[in-house]
Amino acid sequence: MKITAILTQQGSDFTATMECEHCGHTAELTSGYHDGFYHARVIPAMRCTSCGKNRAGELKHTHERPSAVFRPALSIDGDQWCALYGANLQDGVAGFGRSPADAMRAFDTAWSAKLPAVTPNAKVTG
């Protein structure tokens, strides 16, 4: 979550509008505090009530992540790790990264990605 607007401030206390970097959900923060610890540690750890992710994109319950539930196969592909669920890249879901953890995070993102819209082929008349 990130601060998009400070609504009120009294001394070091403030209220603000917050926005999720991942899903765009907005919420009101009713009690914030202006100091280094709050801005460096507390705000980045806040979780979106819509998607459940913190600023780093981590879910609260890592055992609920798609990579933990579906356990994709890990392999090395060139200079990256590949986390693949399915028979192949065309029919499955995959994530790539410089480390196994990066590949699993990319897999979690890919798992939630929507397929692109398919447009019907236009008939050509001549």
Image: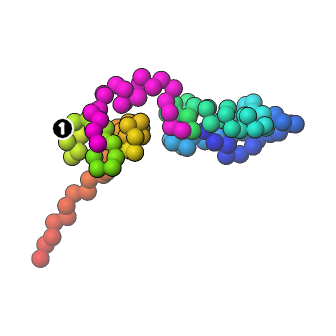
Binning the other alpha carbons within 10 Å of mark 1 as few (below 14), some (14 to 19) or many (20 upward) gives few
Vertically, is 33 above or below 79? above
Work out which quarter of the rendered image holds the C terminus and state it.
bottom left
> Which quadrant of the structure image shows residue 86?
top left
Give the residue displayed 49% in from the left and 30% down from the top: 59
**24 or 21, which is in the foreground?**
21
The answer to whether 83 is drawn above or below residue 116 in the figure is above
- Residue at 72% across / 34% down in the picture? 38
Secondary structure beneath label 1 = loop
Q: Is residue 58 visible?
A: yes
Q: Position of residue 48 (x, y in %)?
A: 56, 33
**Residue 113 visible in the displayed image:** no
Its colouring scheme is rainbow
Say which residue label 1 marks.
87
Q: Answer left or right for 6 relative to 44.
A: right
- 59 lies left or right of 33: left
Residue 42 on the magenta segment: no
The three-letter amino acid code for the residue at tag 1 is Ala
Quarter of the image with the N terminus is: top right
Compared with 68, 101 (above or below) is: below
Q: Where residue 7 sits: x, y (%)?
A: 76, 41
Q: In which quarter of the view is residue 109 placed?
A: top left
- For this orientation, the residue located farthest to the right is 11
- The residue lying toward the viewer, choosing from 29 and 61, is 61
Q: Residue at x 34, y 25 (%)?
A: 69
Q: Is residue 25 left or right of residue 120?
A: right
Residue 111: % across, % down? 35, 37
Magenta-colored span = 56-76
